[in-house]
Amino acid sequence: MKRNLINPYSDVRDAILETARGYRGTPFRHQGLLPGRGLDCVGVIVCIGRDLGLFRYDVVGYPRVPSTFSSLLQHVRAAGFRPVPLTDALPGDVYLMAIIDRPQHVALATDKGILHAWMQARQVVEHGLDDMWRSRIVGVYRFPSVA
């Protein structure tokens, strides 16, 4: 897909951001997959992929805290996400984040920071990527078929 010289992001990336921003304010609900009714961090990414036809992978019955260091990472890879260096992260990519001692959170990179379903905020929010959130990033992944 060609990049627009005025807009450095692809049309697909713009659609990812627009879709995700439509989820803002959705209440946090563990294993939630219903924008406007309830989403968790994984649900935000799954719904973007589903709504835009980027992938069909989904998983249910997962715990709030993954049982192993690699369990969330395995699902990210099984869904077809590709790893990219942190220095190459673009709006529309997905940050895999460690909370406590293992990856257990995902957030969408945006031009403003991150967008995610945040349990403490009780909803889907978008905010800056400060040092606390930046220190939690353990990987960056690109949606399948997104350049």
Image (spheres, rainbow, N blue to C red):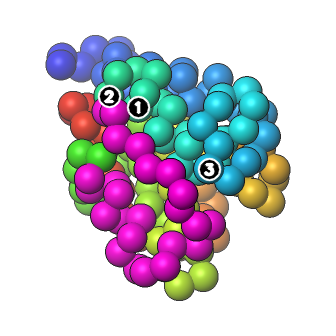
Q: Which mark is residue 31?
A: 3
Q: Please, what is the dominant secondary structure of the magenta stretch?
A: loop
Circle 3 sits in a helix, a strand or a loop, which is it? loop
Q: Residue at x 50, y 51 (%)?
A: 60
Residue 63 position by quadrant: bottom right
Residue 94: in magenta span: no
Disc 1 to disc 2, C-alpha distance: 5 Å
The crowd level at tag 2 (other Cα within 10 Å; few <14, some 14-19, many 20+) is some
Q: In this rendered view, identify the residue nearer to me: 112 or 115.
A: 115
Disc 3 to disc 2, C-alpha distance: 20 Å
Q: Residue at x 60, y 82 (%)?
A: 100
The magenta span reads 55-78
Mark nearer the viewer, 1 or 3: 3
Residue receiving disc 1: 49
Quadrant position of the N terminus in the picture: top left
Disc 1 to disc 3, C-alpha distance: 16 Å
Q: Residue 105's x, y, as percent?
A: 54, 62
Amino acid type of the residue that numbered disc 3 sits on in the rendered structure:
Gln
The crowd level at tag 1 (other Cα within 10 Å; few <14, some 14-19, many 20+) is many
Q: Which mark is residue 98?
A: none
Residue 86's place in the image compared with 15, above or below, is below
CB under 8 Å between discs 1 and 2: yes
Q: Residue 57's x, y, as percent?
A: 34, 41
Q: Which callout, 1 or 3, points at the residue further toward the start of the chain?
A: 3
Residue receiving disc 2: 54
Q: Residue 15's x, y, as percent?
A: 44, 19
Q: Which callout, 1 or 2, points at the residue further toward the start of the chain?
A: 1
Circle 1 sits in a helix, a strand or a loop, which is it? helix
Residue 61: in magenta span: yes
Q: Which callout, 3 or 2, points at the residue further toward the start of the chain?
A: 3
- In the drawing, does residue 21 fall left or right of residue 4? right
Circle 2 sits in a helix, a strand or a loop, which is it? loop
